[in-house]
């Protein structure tokens, strides 16, 4: 009996029962927040499968499939070894646009390299039926430059309508000036084909000394990436230092300023670069958070559950533990609404579900998947 009770207690700790629904005010009325699943260790990203299940990454180096009613699969087999230290580990995951036919996924992770880690992008097939597993796993892109000891990997990935993939790379918190140099991938957003090649129309193809995969540069630690479904523009969001978190619209060959200019300051209060917020040749952010909220995953909302929020850009916040809704007028952000502040959870990722609700990941050792919908 004592053994059974002990096992029951261990299982309850690993997979806690869903908490009661909580309610929070918003401009769209009262929000109902429910726990869909618990027992996830530092979940980092999720992607919805066609049948409504979720493919979820856990930073220590796992993927799981989660059913709509919250059942967790065993860890998906075939995942490569990760450098799981500090911010490093298993990161983002995205389905190929033709996943229903080819079962292809893309995922990013901190790959062990030179005593530390570097951002890598892999392609694989998620096997249908049986125990969850990956097959045909292949790393198709590796960040070029010195390794990170555990910080600033970036690591978000999205696939554009033409099939090409955008991947964010942090500057590894090593030599931040490398974000301004085109001979490496630190502090860059890269654009590659599904085979990992640089498309011929990338901005620096053929330029001596420049990496051909680079799309934009001058980034710090970009942990948000989303494509505007109305016009296909790629929006990116990144951590500043003490302030200066940015939301940018990525332009081909654009320089986004780090570490020459910033709306923030260094952690010791000293100026960053020139000490200015703008300079010629640098693309200004469309929004910035000062002080820093430590933003992470971002998503555009297109659903019908919140008709007044269509077109809004949602951003998770780690430090400020909230969900930020940015209201837009075209390419301009005109208003911010801060939601779920009393939830007191680090929001690592946010995605729109097939039911029109928002699904959030909480980043801690007992992470949860939350569903946000209108209270009836």
Image (tube, helix red, strand yellow):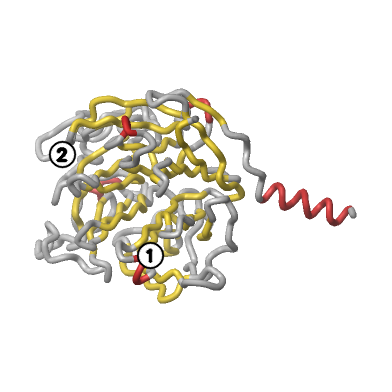
Q: Which sits earlier in the primary sequence, circle 1 or circle 2? A: 1
Look at the numbered discs 1 and 2 and tell me whether their residues touch, using CB distance below 8 Å: no
Residue 337 at x, y percent in the picture: 36, 26
User: Which residue is nearer to you in this view: 146 or 97?
Assistant: 97
Q: Residue at x 38, y 48 (%)?
A: 152
Q: Quadrant of residue 72?
A: bottom right
What element does badge 2 sit on? Answer: loop
Quadrant in the picture for the N terminus: bottom right
What is the residue that sits farthest to the right in this orientation?
A: 1
Q: Position of residue 350 (x, y in %)?
A: 41, 43
Which of the 4 image quadrants contains residue 48? bottom left
37 relative position to 149: left or right: right
Who is closer to the viewer here, 82 or 368?
A: 368
Residue beneath the point at 62% across and 35% down: 20
Does residue 9 appear in the picture of this structure? Answer: yes
Q: Which residue is mark 2?
A: 283
Q: Please state if 295 lies on the left or on the right of 84 as rendered.
A: left
Mark 2 packing: few (<14 Cα in 10 Å), some, or many (20+)? some
Image location of residue 313, percent across then percent down: 31, 37
Q: Nearer the viewer, residue 209 or 332?
A: 332
Residue marked by disc 1: 105
Q: Residues within 10 Å of mark 1 (few under 14, many from 20)?
A: many
| Residue 89 visible somewhere in the drawing | no
Vertical comparison of 223 with 337: above or below: below
Residue at disc 1, secondary structure: strand
The residues tagged by marks 1 and 2 sit, at their Cα atoms, a distance apart of: 32 Å
Residue beneath the point at 26% across and 48% down: 227
Q: Position of residue 131 (x, y in %)?
A: 56, 71
């Amino acid at each position: 009996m004592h053994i059974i009770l002990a096992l029951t207690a261990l299982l309850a700790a690993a997979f806690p029962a869903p908490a009661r629904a909580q309610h929070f005010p918003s401009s769209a009325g009262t929000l109902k927040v429910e726990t869909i699943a618990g027992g996830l260790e530092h979940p980092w990203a999720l992607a919805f499968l066609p049948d409504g299940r979720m493919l979820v990454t856990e930073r220590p180096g796992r993927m799981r499939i989660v059913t709509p009613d919250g059942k967790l699969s065993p860890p998906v087999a075939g995942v490569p070894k990760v450098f799981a230290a500090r911010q490093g580990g298993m990161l983002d995951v995205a389905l190929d646009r033709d996943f229903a036919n080819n079962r292809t996924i893309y995922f990013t992770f901190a790959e062990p390299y030179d005593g530390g880690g570097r951002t890598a992008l892999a392609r694989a097939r998620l096997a249908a039926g049986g125990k969850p597993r990956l097959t045909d796993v292949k790393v198709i892109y590796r960040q070029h430059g010195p390794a990170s000891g555990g910080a600033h990997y970036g690591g978000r990935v999205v696939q554009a309508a033409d099939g090409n993939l955008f991947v964010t790379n942090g500057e590894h918190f090593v030599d931040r000036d490398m974000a301004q140099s085109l001979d490496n991938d630190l502090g860059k957003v890269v654009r590659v084909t599904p085979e990992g090649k640089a498309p011929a129309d990338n901005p620096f193809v053929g330029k001596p000394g420049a990496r051909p995969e680079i799309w934009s540069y001058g980034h710090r630690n970009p942990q948000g990436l989303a494509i505007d479904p109305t016009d296909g523009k790629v929006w990116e969001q990144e951590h500043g230092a003490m302030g200066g978190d940015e939301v940018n619209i990525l332009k081909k060959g654009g320089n986004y300023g780090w570490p020459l200019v910033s709306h923030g300051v260094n952690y010791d209060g000293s100026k960053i670069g020139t000490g200015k917020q703008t300079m010629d040749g640098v693309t200004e952010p469309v929004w910035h958070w000062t002080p820093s909220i430590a933003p992470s995953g971002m998503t555009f909302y297109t659903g019908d559950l919140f008709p007044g929020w269509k077109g809004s850009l949602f951003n998770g916040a780690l430090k400020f533990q909230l969900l930020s809704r940015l209201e837009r007028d075209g390419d301009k952000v005109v208003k911010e609404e801060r939601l779920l502040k009393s939830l007191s959870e680090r929001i690592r990722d946010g995605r729109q579900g097939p039911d029109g609700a928002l699904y959030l990941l909480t980043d801690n050792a007992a992470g949860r998947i939350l569903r946000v919908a209108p209270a009836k």
